Image (cartoon, rainbow, N blue to C red):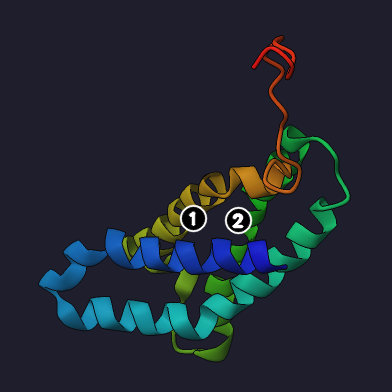
Amino acid sequence: MQTAFLIYIRAVGLYMVVTLPVLIAPIMYFVSVIYVFIFGWFAWGLFSVIYLLCTQIKTYETKMLLLIPGVVISVAFAFHMLGVFNRDLDVWNSGGFMLFPITGVIAGWISLFMARKKISGAEETPEIINTGVSETLQ
């Protein structure tokens, strides 16, 4: 659960950095960031459920095969909830504003791949490197 939360927090940070060029129109940037803080928790909740389901899977490739679309589904769910709570917005027909959830998905994927050691379980069990030299010779 901690790994899913760290992936989410890192993705939010990456999103905020990647969307910095929008500061040309500061209102749009700050509204976007506020929406991420308010509705991003929907994405985190859904992604956490998907991540917990994937912890039972042994192979890294299969986990990532499920987690990569899990990021897309989670961001789409959060974006949809924006439209549910603000009925005046037609979020799925918002033209250029669709770049914001696309950026969120890309930030989520980058964050996911940055956590690949934790996802694969490599950090939990360190690998022992066999050099072929016995300890008596050292």
| Place of residue 76 in the rendered image (x, y in percent of width and height, measured from the top left) | 57, 64
Work out whether residue 134 or residue 89 is closer to the camera in this orientation and state it: 134
Numbered-mark total: 2
How far across and how far down the image is residue 18, in percent?
29, 58
First of labels 1, 2 by sequence position: 2
**Is 18 situated left or right of 61 in this image?**
left
Q: Please name whichever residue, 118 or 69, is drawn nearer the observer in this view of the structure.
A: 118
Badge 1 crowding class, 10 Å Cα cut-off, few under 14, some 14 to 19, many 20 or more, is many
Where, quadrant-wise, is the N terminus in this rendering?
Answer: bottom right
Are dots 1 and 2 in contact, CB under 8 Å? Answer: yes
| Residue at image coords 80%, 61% | 52
Q: Nearer the viewer, residue 23 or 86?
A: 23
Give left or right: position of 55 versus 111: right
Using the numbered discs, state the Cα–Cα distance from disc 1 to disc 2 in whole angstroms: 6 Å
Q: Report x, y in % for residue 29.
A: 25, 76
Q: Horizontal placement of 70 versus 105: left or right?
A: right
- Asked whether the viewer can see residue 75, the reply is no
* Element marked by disc 2: helix
| Residue 32 higher or lower than 18, as above or below | below
SS at badge 1: helix
Residue located 38% across and 60% down the image: 14
Residue at position x 71%, y 67% in the image = 48
Using the image, tell me which numbered label, if any, was put on residue 71. 2
Query: Which residue corresponds to mark 1?
Result: 105
Q: Quadrant of residue 58?
A: top right
- Amino acid on which disc 1 is placed: Val
